[in-house]
Image: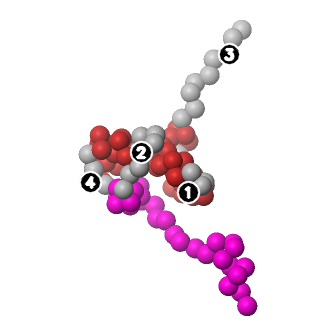
């Protein structure tokens, strides 16, 4: 008997604030900014694109364009999106900085 599988959609598993925060943190740690943009799209989809667009004061189509593969959204757009998702980005010293600043 042939097995069939449904396409994987990360948005189906982003069902708590803690999971969303961990998911975005891991995506942001990747050197490829497209990974973070895609993760933001997954979270927006999980929370509801229309509501997130409204909360971010962006048009729904504009949000889709900003999150499309290969898009280069402005920082202002990303900041609005992050705020509407109810998460924050924190800047902390990196491991290599901690080692060089200790006396």
Provide residue 96's location: percent of width, then percent of height: 69, 73
User: Which quarter of the rendered picture does the C terminus lie within?
Assistant: bottom right
Image point (37%, 46%), residue name? 66
Provide residue 42's location: percent of width, then percent of height: 48, 43
Q: Can residue 38 be spotted in the picture?
A: yes
Between disc 1 and disc 3, the foreground one is 1
* Left or right of 6, for residue 70: left
Q: Along the polypeptide, which appears first: circle 3 or circle 2?
A: 3
Image point (72%, 79%), residue name? 99
Mark 3 vs 4: CB contact within 8 A = no
Q: Main secondary structure of the magenta part?
A: helix
Compared to residue 38, the image places residue 83 above or below, namely below
Q: Which mark is on residue 28?
A: 1
The residue at which mark 2 appears reads as: 71
- Dot 2 crowding, Cα within 10 Å, few <14, some 14–19, many 20+: few
The residue at which mark 4 appears reads as: 57
The residue at which mark 3 appears reads as: 3
Image point (69%, 11%), residue name? 2
Check residue 78 for magenta coloring: yes
Q: Which residues are magenta?
A: 75-103
SS state under label 3: loop
Image point (35%, 42%), residue name? 65
Distance from Cα at disc 3 to Cα at disc 4: 44 Å
Mark 1 vs 4: CB contact within 8 A = no
User: Which quarter of the rendered picture does the N terminus lie within?
Assistant: top right
Q: Along the polypeptide, which appears first: circle 1 or circle 3?
A: 3
Between disc 1 and disc 4, the foreground one is 1
Provide residue 46's location: percent of width, then percent of height: 45, 43
Distance from Cα at disc 1 to Cα at disc 2: 16 Å
Q: Along the polypeptide, which appears first: circle 1 or circle 4?
A: 1
Mark 3 vs 2: CB contact within 8 A = no
SS state under label 4: loop
């Amino acid at each position: 008997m042939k097995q069939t599988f449904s396409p994987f959609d990360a948005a189906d598993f982003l069902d708590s604030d803690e999971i969303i925060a961990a998911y975005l943190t891991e995506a942001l740690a990747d050197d490829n900014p497209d990974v973070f943009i895609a993760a933001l799209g997954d979270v927006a989809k999980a929370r509801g694109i229309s509501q997130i667009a409204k909360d971010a004061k962006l048009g729904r189509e504009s949000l889709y364009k900003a999150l499309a593969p290969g898009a280069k959204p402005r920082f202002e757009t990303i900041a609005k999106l992050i705020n509407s998702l109810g998460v924050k980005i924190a800047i902390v010293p990196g491991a290599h900085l901690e080692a060089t600043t200790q006396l």
